[in-house]
Image (cartoon, coloured by chain):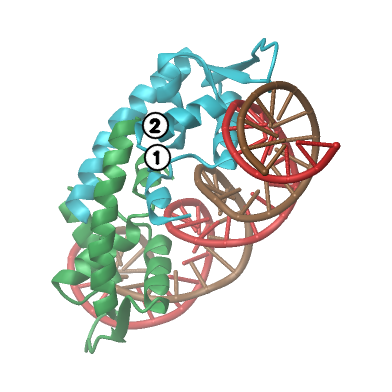
Chain colours: A cyan, B green, C brown, D red
DNA sequence: ATATATACCTAGACAGGCGAAGTATATAAT
DNA sequence: ATTATATACTTCGCCTGTCTAGGTATATAT
């Protein structure tokens, strides 16, 4: 894990929730969106992405369903729940607090 | 570990190096300084602090020596090395990059 | 005597991120 | 035909920083 990843650690779930706020989406698409938003400076490793989905779903923050693609690889879509939206809001606030602390300390 | 600690993860070494930039110091004093700077919003757990010292010293980023206190508990002082100063500078830059990425993604 | 503050140390558990490997469909290039 | 590339998901087990919980020791205040 490079230094940037180390500093992004702990934001993975918030990043995923943020993407699902716009629309239901699936792993591959979410990761592409992250790459585009960051001009290819960042992407989630697959294992990281899919283990985060498991945690979020087990916690009731997202739910999943299979897409009905007639061709190509199957897609598992995810939707954010009300609890997920609430946690996202809280995580945004926590980030503001953490940012202030870090700026104070480094 | 609370959410704030989770988001501060990865900054522990940088925070310690920052403190040692001012002057040689020891674990207890460094932690008190962190608490004061943050108005008691944050502190390092002892195990976290001392394991970070071990890593930093093994990596040649700090060095340590025993204080010559005639009374009270013994103190192990730490000093930042040139390599430590260089890493601190790099970590500051990495933080700016990470901050931008996070702001973009959450 | 007891509590509190100062000061350090370590073993083992925990949790998120990751490398590596696998499965499957579809298209483009050789 | 074969190979490469893109799309798309999954799981195992390791790595690493943090934490819980415990320990040691000196000094002062109640």
CB of mark 1 within 8 Å of CB of mark 2? yes
Outermost residue on the left side: it is B22
Q: Does the rendering let one see residue B61?
A: yes
Residue A46 to residue D9: above or below: below
Label 2 marks which chain's residue? A
Residue B51 to residue C25: above or below: below
Residue at the image point whose x is 39% and y is 19% from the top = A86
Is disc 2 surrounded by few (<14), some (14 to 19) or many (20+) residues within 10 Å? few
Q: Position of residue A68 (x, y in %)?
A: 67, 10
Q: Position of residue A51 (x, y in %)?
A: 59, 36
Q: Which residue is mark 2?
A: A36
Label 1 marks which chain's residue? A
Residue at the image point whose x is 31% and y is 82% from the top = B64
Residue at the image point whose x is 51% and y is 25% from the top = A29
Mark number, residue B81: none
- A104 vs D3, left or right, is left
Front-most of residues B96 and B37: B96
Q: Which residue is mark 1?
A: A40
Which quarter of the figure has residue A48? top right
Q: Quadrant of the C terminus of chain B?
A: top left
- B62 vs A13, left or right, is left
């Amino acid at each position: 894990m490079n230094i940037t990843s180390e500093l992004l650690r702990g934001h993975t779930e918030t990043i995923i929730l943020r993407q699902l706020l716009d629309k239901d989406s699936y792993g591959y698409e979410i990761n592409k969106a992250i790459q585009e938003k960051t001009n290819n400076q960042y992407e989630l490793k697959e294992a990281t992405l899919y283990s985060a989905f498991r945690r979020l779903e087990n916690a009731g923050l997202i739910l999943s369903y299979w897409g009905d693609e007639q061709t190509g690889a199957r897609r598992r879509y995810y939707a954010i729940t009300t609890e997920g939206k609430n946690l996202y809001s809280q995580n945004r606030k926590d980030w503001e607090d953490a940012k202030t602390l870090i700026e104070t300390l480094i």
